[in-house]
Image (cartoon, rainbow, N blue to C red):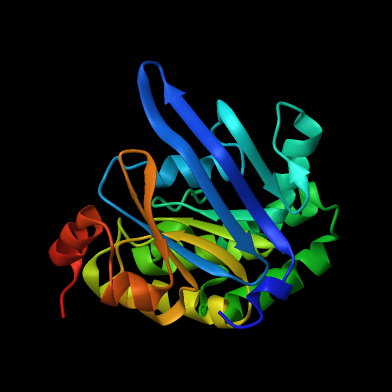
Amino acid sequence: MANGAAKPLMIELKGVSKWFGEFQALKNVDLTVRSGERVVVCGPSGSGKSTMIRCINRLESHDAGSIVVDGIELTDDTKNITAVRREVGMVFQQFNLFPHLTVLDNLTLAPMKARGMSSQDARALAMQYLERVHIPEQAHKYPSQLSGGQQQRVAIARSLCMQPKVMLFDEPTSALDPEMIKEVLDAMVELATGGMTMIVVTHEMGFAKQVADQMVFMAGGEVVEHASPQDFFNHPKSERTKTFLSQILIH
């Protein structure tokens, strides 16, 4: 990536390890993400991908190593955790929308509560991001009235309403029907081209080829391969990466 070195460091993981009882989910993981970079993380199920990004906004605590987000180290200090979460948006497999609130109310809740925004300003911001994900006409509907793809786009808009510096996506299309995947990926591509710093856990390799600055392949809790998309897809070094790509890539 040209001029990437000039961009400020946004996320840095050094020697990050995580255990669940006897099981080591992350083994000495290193990762550096600069402002505006898009990193796609892939790998087989159970490889530690989701655990890694959940550690970045402290949904999981790491047991060893260090995680620094926008200059703030994640420790047990709740003040640091709150500060990091304010800057990091996250979109999950499940949409996690409040079913009893309209789309608009789902979007305005956090900016009003966490950022002290007025109702009028929060609504204006919410409509701006609903426009960005191309569903402003759904503002007054309830989540149950929307398709899965629309709900996931609402979830993306809701995260954007907190105006984060980083967006984390944990397999955002895996719960969707095939015909709805493209609309969500299109919204993410738009976000990526707008310069958002993103870490995306996904099996959507077409999306990865389109937007990624870095490809990270994980297996067994480790980063097995870390390369540019061109090298990753055309010249993978690890046998595990080659096997994975042969299974997942549909030319």
The reply to whether residue 136 is in sight is no
Q: Residue at x 23, y 70 (%)?
A: 178
Q: Is residue 246 left or right of residue 100?
A: left
Percent coordinates x, y for residue 222 in the rendering: 38, 42
**Which of 216 and 97 lies nearest the eye of the viewer?**
216
The reply to whether residue 241 is in sight is yes
Q: Residue at x 56, y 83 (%)?
A: 193
Up-down relation of residue 141 to residue 87 (above or below): below
Q: Is residue 228 left or right of residue 72?
A: left
Q: Residue at x 77, y 64 (%)?
A: 122
Percent coordinates x, y for residue 242 in the rendering: 20, 62
Q: Quadrant of residue 215?
A: bottom left
Quarter of the picture containing the N terminus is: bottom right
Percent coordinates x, y for residue 221 in the rendering: 37, 39
Up-down relation of residue 126 to residue 143 (above or below): below
Q: Residue at x 51, y 73 (%)?
A: 138
Percent coordinates x, y for residue 181 in the rendering: 32, 71
Q: Quadrant of residue 25?
A: top left
**Which of 107 and 141 lies nearest the eye of the viewer?**
107
Up-down relation of residue 211 to residue 218 (above or below): below
- Badge count: 0
**Which of 7 and 48 lies nearest the eye of the viewer?**
7
Q: Is residue 159 left or right of residue 186?
A: right
Farthest residue toward the top? Answer: 21
Quarter of the picture containing the C terminus is: bottom left
Up-down relation of residue 191 to residue 170 (above or below): below
Farthest residue toward the front? Answer: 237
